[in-house]
Image (cartoon, rainbow, N blue to C red):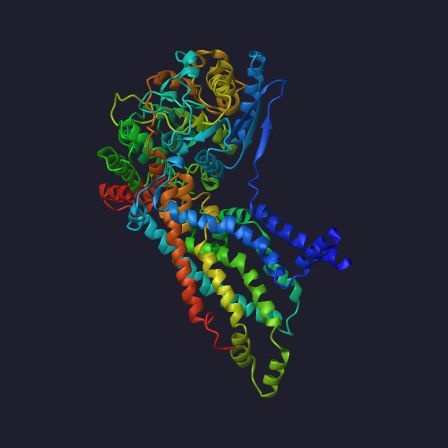
Amino acid sequence: MESKKKKRLSSRFLYSQKIAPYVFIAPFLITFVVFFAYSIVNMVVMSFQNVAGANSTFIGLQNYQKILPNAVFQKALKNSIFYTIVSCALMIPIPLVMAVMLNSRHMKGKAFFRSLLFIPALTSVVVSGVMFRLMFGELEGSFMNKLIGLFGAGPLIWLRTPVTVWIILFFLCMWRWTGVNMMYYLSGLQQIDSALYESAAIDGAGTLDTFRYITIPLLKPTTIYVLTISIFGGMAMFSESYMIFNGNKSPNNVGTTLVGMLYRMGFEQGNLGIASAIGVVFLLIVLVVNVVQLFINGTFGRKED
Amino acid sequence: MKKRLLVTLLTASLAMAAIGAVPAMASDDGSTQGTNTFVDGGTDLSFWTFQELHVAFWTTMADVWNEQNPDRPINLTVTNGESHSLHTKLLTACEAGEGTPDIADIEIGYYGSFVNKGYLIPINDAVEPYENDVVMSRVTMYGDPEGNYYGVDFHLGASVAYYNMDIMNAAGVDPADIVTWDDFIEAGKKVLEATGKPMCAVETADLFLPQMMMLELGAQYVDAEGNPNLVTDEHVQVIDKIREMIDLGICIVAPGGGFHTEEWYGFLDQDGVACVLMPLWYMGRFTDYMPDLNQKMAIYQIPVWNEGDVREVLQGGTGTSVIKGTENEQLAKDFLAFAKLSKEGCTYEWNELGFDPIRTELWDDPEITENKDNKFLAYFTTNPFDILKANGTELTAPDISGLYSTTYSTLVSTTYANAFEISIDMDAAELLQQEQDSIIF
């Protein structure tokens, strides 16, 4: 009798409509609280401290007063913002067009191109960073200098000139992430009802018209998602720059981002209070940018329902 | 019944996937391990190093130690990983006070952070028995103003000038005649005229040449309190001198920005430059990466500012230290001092790693200095021990105390890139002030 009751209790627990959702989200929630929420709260606290293990002391706003006027911090901030803007400008239209092309009935070798474009996302940044560093070597014999030599251009010092450094970083970014964003768009495209295209064709709409009036509007949820993760990804850029410069030091900080500076202050120099302050500023910027972006895109409004 | 099993399985697998996702994010940094021949009853010691070549040194020395000290045997496990990430992990572990090794190799650029925060154990008593046999300036530099030493270097790190004799002969210059920087510049002009090649190179991502010239003037990057001190007359003088050489075309920015890059090795190997000014431990880079320069390179003393100045400076290095929190403090200290300062240890370091010995008796031991089978003595056309003997034992070492690590990080990321490449026309004092202001401490 007792065991039967227990059994019923456990089965009631397992089949309960109310409890089941919480059970399913529990793993995420627990990892989130332990590894993210706790660290974020702690980071905010540490940003007001002179962190020295057990002897940490509160020093008010001193950490912020040190970083905000600092030239390197401002440069890192500019670098991060510039990288985010340009990478979003590149990483949304290009994968979108590629996805539409790959989704087209007339396209040959779809599976081949799809995997080809996706492979870079599976390689490690460490390996690709080293490859890029060697390809963009500054001696005459390096791959890229040979290549531009074919067009009569002289050997370039790729990794120590700001313009070429940015070209390389965007090139690496595109090479690596185009395939991923393209996959998001492909899955978005496959959800669009083909009947819409058929009726548009019957009404005499051309390819560009259907792209403009059917594909783009219906892909809006995908675009918002891709934009959001691209903003996070762009602001958080670090490993690409770390690998290309063989360490967290780029000449005159051309490739130093906020995360790079945070890493330098916190883990290379052991100044965790300053690093936390940078982290808080960083978090605020990303939050504001994304909330504004989502607001503009109408994600918070429910008027369409 | 079946349904319930299914539900349980699903939940379990989801939970496992969620848990599994976390460790899967940790990247594998390709660290490797080495051990000595373990003996029964040996004390376990753990060791971290960022340099793969050091692994064999430490495990070999542990075996020698066990032979000589059967009453205090050790079982040493050496873990090796990539430099940046290893130092970062070590600093984080020290910060947390958990998971630290007993002993670790700490590169000079990072060393200050560890001393500054009190993460290392003084080793004065373990070094004492060796005091009269070694160059003590190489031990005291890893110390604090109170007279504690925390680490011992692998090598002396005496700076020398490596000349490519093919280029020097083509220009008709005998490196032995170069004494001052002005002589060096005159020779550089001849080299440029005769061969079209630059005399030397300067790094933008490291600091060896400017630091050498600073130390010759007796100047340091940090002041007596250990605070960053970039704006000094000596520093301005050094930057102006290097800029003068760049303007004349006899000094270039090293391809790749540093003397440890793939581009630079290739450039140097193809007779790209007449002279490299680096410490003696750089010999290993020649034997490893520049096979084509075999028997072409000669080692001479470095140029100085004024005739009659002592031509010696110590640079670079790795301080091996006992980390706070070890349970075998005395044993770790004694083993560390034995490995680095004993005759056995110094001989191994010279023969296998090409490190100029810290122990002076080896400088006069013909078995070492005249050994034709030694790959370093066979590679170079002059004998480096002549320079060590001429320099003596009163040597100038960099001050790495206080905020040296923080200062170093700025110097090698912005200061020298600006000074020698990006803002080459900006007034040196003004530039240094701007750099000084950008340091957060």
Q: How many marks?
A: 0
Q: Residue furthest bottom?
A: A203
Q: Position of residue A275 (x, y in %)?
A: 38, 45
Is residue A208 left or right of B157 when viewed as pictured? right
Q: Is residue A16 above or below residue B183?
A: below
Q: Is residue B30 above or below residue B126?
A: below
Depth order, front residue of A36/B381? A36
Depth order, front residue of B11/A247? B11
Residue A11 appears in the figure: yes
Place residue B55 in its image quadrant: top right
Q: Is residue B158 above or below residue B197?
A: above
Give me the residue at 43% from left, 67% from top. A293
Is residue A10 left or right of B241 when viewed as pictured? right
The N terminus of chain B: image quadrant: bottom right
Q: Position of residue B433 (x, y in %)?
A: 24, 42
Depth order, front residue of A60/B262? A60
Give me the residue at 30% from left, 25% from top. B179
Q: Position of residue B239 (x, y in %)?
A: 27, 38
